[in-house]
Amino acid sequence: FLEVLTRHLEIQNLEIKTIPLPVTLSSLLATIPNPILPYCEQYLGNPDIVHGTDHVVYPCQKSLRLMTIHDLTFIKYPQYVNSIVKSYTARVKQCLRWTDLVITVSQSTKQDIVNYLGVNPDNIQVIPQASRYSTLDLPNTLDLPNTKVESLVTSVNYDFAQPYILFVSTLEPRKNINTLIAAFNYLKQRHQIEHQLVLIGQKGWSYESIFADIASSPWKHHIHHLGYLSDQLVAWFYSNADVFVYPSYYEGFGLPVLEAMTLGAPVITSNTSSLPEVAGDAAILIDPNQPIELADAMVKVISNSQFREELIRKGKERAMLFSWERTARETLAAYTSLVGKGRGRGVLERSSILDN
């Protein structure tokens, strides 16, 4: 995204400077009074806009201030995040006092920001994300050397020629993997499916219950956690999955759904938060609290080849609506609009419901 955005800015004879900062330093800079910031602005050449891309922006004295809010998990579902992420609530509320424009990634998250933080909807710009595979040459991405496949097969003692159900994301409570495991157990018992369940992703916060459910499953030897894999290997698994399942409770956007559709995997996902917005009519939407409903959806996909191919076709068409070119173009438009409007008095329309 940054590469594409830089290209668009250079066409307009504009310059971009990126400053990666750790969370602790970002939080320190996002305070008032702050004697350091004037020197930072001067060092950067007094930029027209300072864009904080991860739930923070600094109270700059001269620059316009834009903040990206990806989701409000830390407010809506604090039980799904660790103590560091929970601290985002106070930081975001503070930054909104001086923010001139908010960017978010879905209409669902925009509505959350309005409802929970009291931000004027006119001061929120929705700019969707895109798949990490959207700009790649997909045939080359999927052309995986046999040696890599053989090495992976050996490392997990699993024959990947067998059909599988796929999940890709961090393993944490919010992703609702326990319900996926329950649905898989039901399918094995009720329908005797031959499929394996493949989980790709690093262990996240409070992952222990997921592995406890795997260990207690009668089909635990059919459930495979592969951890972190390269983008090329993940693409190979997406493209060869009989179905991709993403039963998350809450998402700001839901990139794995878009990745799966881009790479030709039929998708089942939750009917909550931003996921219906991303999936459109190109996926089966299920209640994430109903494992039997999820199991029935999986059976429908893996047992009906015509329906499966229809989902794949719709998914690829849907994925074409999202690109990093679009994201960069709309971000540049937001910058231009903000400069034209100038500095305001913050984006808040009313007090936050969290203050009541």
Image (spheres, helix red, strand yellow):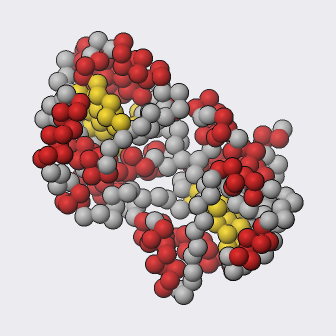
Q: Locate residue 237, reporting x and y percent.
A: 25, 43
Residue drawn at 57 percent across, 68 percent down: 18
Q: Determine the residue located farthest toward the right in the rendered image.
A: 33
Question: Quadrant of residue 288 in the image?
Answer: top left
Question: Quadrant of residue 61 in the image?
Answer: bottom right
Q: Locate residue 275, reporting x and y percent.
A: 46, 44
Residue drawn at 75 percent across, 54 percent down: 28
Q: Is residue 332 above or below residue 182?
A: below
Residue drawn at 38 percent across, 51 percent down: 258
128 lies left or right of 231? right
> Looking at the image, can residue 246 be seen?
yes
Q: Nearer the viewer, residue 355 or 281?
A: 355
73 lies left or right of 164? right
297 lies left or right of 252? left
**How many numbered marks have been drawn onto this rendered protein structure?**
0
269 lies left or right of 9? left
Name the quarter where the C terminus is drawn.
top right
Q: Is residue 40 above or below residue 153?
A: below
Q: Locate residue 218, reporting x and y percent.
A: 29, 12
Residue drawn at 29 percent across, 32 percent down: 198
> Looking at the image, can residue 164 be seen?
no
Q: Locate residue 310, reporting x and y percent.
A: 23, 47
Q: Nearer the viewer, residue 221 or 238?
A: 221
Q: Determine the residue located farthest toward the bottom in the rendered image.
A: 13
